[in-house]
Amino acid sequence: QVELVESGGGLVQPGGSLRLSCAASGSIFRVYTMGWYRQAPGKQRELVATITNDGSTVYVDSVKGRFTISRDNAKNTVYLQMNSAKPEDTAVYYCNALVRVQNGIPLASWGQGTQVTVSS
């Protein structure tokens, strides 16, 4: 019904930048809060940042001042601009969105994940 497709992951050097994108598609009536989570090897999945459909944002402390989340409501797309990348940012990054489909109730959907590796 709803598909979230991430793109933009890859290898980046420490101090470098990367931009992740996630587009929601399907029989969408409305997309509410969108966000990014990450899971490093051997660790639990953690929240990175979220953004509401009116632009309010929340960040985990470890990325404040380095990452910026934004969205394009017309395209049902959320972005994560990663600057000043650190090796500890290495993880699989997952997109999440609260989506209401036509004639449905809001449900959380997840993307398939995109690998981000910060290494020299």
Image (cartoon, rainbow, N blue to C red):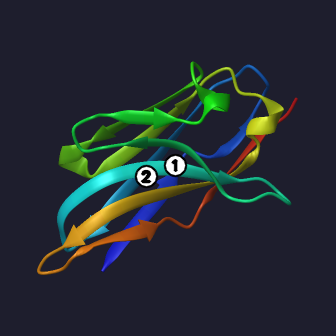
Could you tell me which secondary element the residue under label 2 belongs to? strand
Q: What quarter of the picture does the C terminus occupy?
A: top right
Q: Which mark is residue 92?
A: none
Extreme-left residue of the structure: 103
Between 93 and 7, the residue placed more toward the observer is 93
Q: Amino acid at mark 2?
A: Cys
Q: Position of residue 89 (x, y in %)?
A: 73, 38
Question: Where does residue 52 sit, x and y in percent of width and height?
Answer: 30, 43
Residue 108 vertical position relative to residue 45 in the rendered view, above or below: below
Residue located at (32% from left, 39% from top): 71
The residue drawn where x is 49% and y is 56% is 95
Callout in the foreground (2, 1): 1
> Hey, what amino acid is under mark 1?
Trp
Choose the circle earlier in sequence order: 2 or 1: 2
Please state the horizontal and vertical placement of residue 35, each as a whole percent of the image.
45, 49
Q: Quadrant of residue 118?
A: top right
In this rendered view, identify the residue nearer to me: 64 or 12. 64
- The residue beneath circle 2 is 22
Q: Quadrant of the N terminus?
A: bottom left
Q: Is residue 17 left or right of residue 98?
A: right
- Residue at image position (33%, 48%) is 77
